[in-house]
Image (cartoon, grey):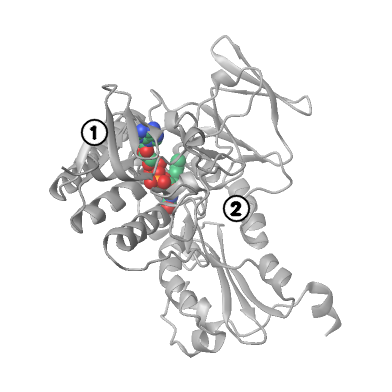
Amino acid sequence: MPKYDYDLFVIGAGSGGVRAARIAASYGAKVAVAEEYRVGGTCVIRGCVPKKLLVYASHFAEEFEEAAGFGWTVGETSFDWKTLVANKDKEIDRLNGIYIRNLQNAGVEIIESRATLADAHTVLLAGTGKKVTAERILIAVGATPFLPDLPGIEHAITSNEAFHLEELPRRVVVVGGGYIAVEFTGIFNGLGAATTQLYRGPLFMRGFDDDLRALLAEEMTKKGVDLRMNADIAAIEKKGGELCLTLANGDVVKTDIVMYATGRVPNTKGLGLESVGVKLGKSGEIVVDGYSQSSVPGIYAVGDVTDRANLTPVAIREGHAFADTVYGGRDVKVDHSIIPTAVFSQPELGTVGLTEADARARDPEIDIYKTAFRAMKSTLSGSQERSFMKLVVDAKTDKVLGVHLMGPASGELIQAIGIAVTMGATKAQFDATIAVHPTAAEELVTLRDKWQPPAQQAAD
Ligand code: FAD
């Protein structure tokens, strides 16, 4: 008789949990995964995928306008939110089905239930009240939107609800300054809603390169977003059919929808972790070592619940590494030091490696190469949108420490550049690469002049 019901019990069938479950099962482990909402998790069901589909939708109005410069006459256009949402939901259902089949084909048992810990080897299934045991438990429960405590907050929505609005609102206020906030601002603005974004600090997109932050703010404003920094909501009131937002400075903003994208918190509440002795960090995240092992032997955690780098490919990598190490007999640690990432704002951002500020803080001897320009397409389309590219280079070793992009396809570009930066490419190696012409990306291998602060330029 086996000592436990399962070798591995995974709580949460999102990016990290699904990958870990499948790979562990492929090594011969008996695996079950519990999911309280929908298999696929945040990314597939209400994150990356539906978000990107809405981003695509929101680009068309601008593209129709730009077509005129190339000789096209686009007839009268109209947009139907319900069609977009229905088509998006169909695609999410399809992906949900694929995730379920992949788990089943790998021999993983799917349990549709909320699961919590009863002890270090026992899981309580809320659906049936049944308890099951496992030699190891992997917590992959992700994170959930954070809402501040203020009067009227019950009238606010988060990204979860934004995907299922009945109608496209006429006016939207997005609160927050991270990537989810700028992406949704771009979506609503592009689809034609009068869109305001409020951020409580002096400049949004904290953690990104300062040039990107400032330029993105300028470009979003040019596209018609009412972007307000140092602005925060003190209270929300529903009056008639509209919401009245009273800001901390006394200003009142009227809107149809207010969407909070003010961060996400690990889903650890009520999981029973404390009673089992699993150490949590100050945001409630599970503290793990390089192998995703928690403070309790046999309990592991991957993905957003560990609050390391909250991105799908990272959760997947962590889940895979866990399964390889524990069930595959390979010693695999995830390197979190270089993570290429995209922001599907309008314009789009792509970034990898150190920001200029972080690089300078480590060692002031760095060289900066940067350029801002209007893409070739703009010459005929009339678009005033600027693109921007920046390289942060170690002056001593010539190694490219960071690349920061704004402009069309920056997300696609940064994936390829991420390979070079991960390999430790030098600026000389970038320069030795033959340019692809005519592209915007050729700027990356033709930047010859070191950027100098304006005062120094004048003195030279
Ligand atoms: P999740 O994918 O969140 O999965 C956790 C699962 O656990 C969920 O399905 C949940 O229902 C389930 N669960 C929770 N508690 C329990 C319980 N007690 N019992 C059973 N089941 C439970 N990342 C990118 O890389 N690129 C993007 O473009 C991107 N866009 C995003 C856009 C939005 C709007 C959001 C919200 C996130 C986005 N992300 C993006 C982040 C990405 O979705 C997450 O980093 C990723 O999903 C984390 O995977 P995970 O496995 O840790 O958790």
The answer to whether residue 168 shows anywhere in this view is yes
Q: In the rendering, at what x and y percent does residue 284 appear? A: 56, 39
* Left or right side of 438 for 176: right
Q: Residue furthest top?
A: 240
Q: CA distance from mark 2 to mark 1?
A: 47 Å
- Three-letter amino acid code at the position of disc 2: Glu
Q: In the rendering, at what x and y percent does residue 395 appear? A: 67, 84
Q: Is mark 2 within 8 Å of ligand 1?
A: no
Q: Residue at x 51, y 50 (%)?
A: 345
The answer to whether residue 56 shows anywhere in this view is no
> Of helix, strand and loop, which one carries label 1?
strand
Asked whether 29 or 66 is in front, the reply is 29
Q: Earlier in the sequence, mark 2 or mark 1?
A: 1
Above or below residue 318? Residue 168 is above
Disc number lying in front (2 or 1)? 1
- Callout 2 crowding tier (Cα within 10 Å): few <14, some 14–19, many ≥20: some
For residue 447, what is the image quadrant? bottom right
Above or below residue 365? Residue 197 is above
Q: Identify the image quadrant of the N terminus.
A: top left
Q: Residue at x 50, y 31 (%)?
A: 269
Q: Residue at x 73, y 69 (%)?
A: 361
- Callout 1 crowding tier (Cα within 10 Å): few <14, some 14–19, many ≥20: some
Q: In the rendering, at what x and y percent does residue 44 appear? A: 33, 43
* Left or right side of 30 for 245: right
Q: In the rendering, at what x and y percent does residue 60 appear? A: 39, 46
Q: Identify the image quadrant of the C terminus.
A: bottom right
Q: Residue furthest right?
A: 459
Residue annotated with mark 2: 219
Residue annotated with mark 1: 111
> Of helix, strand and loop, which one carries label 2?
helix
Asked whether 147 or 413 is in front, the reply is 147
Above or below residue 313? Residue 42 is above
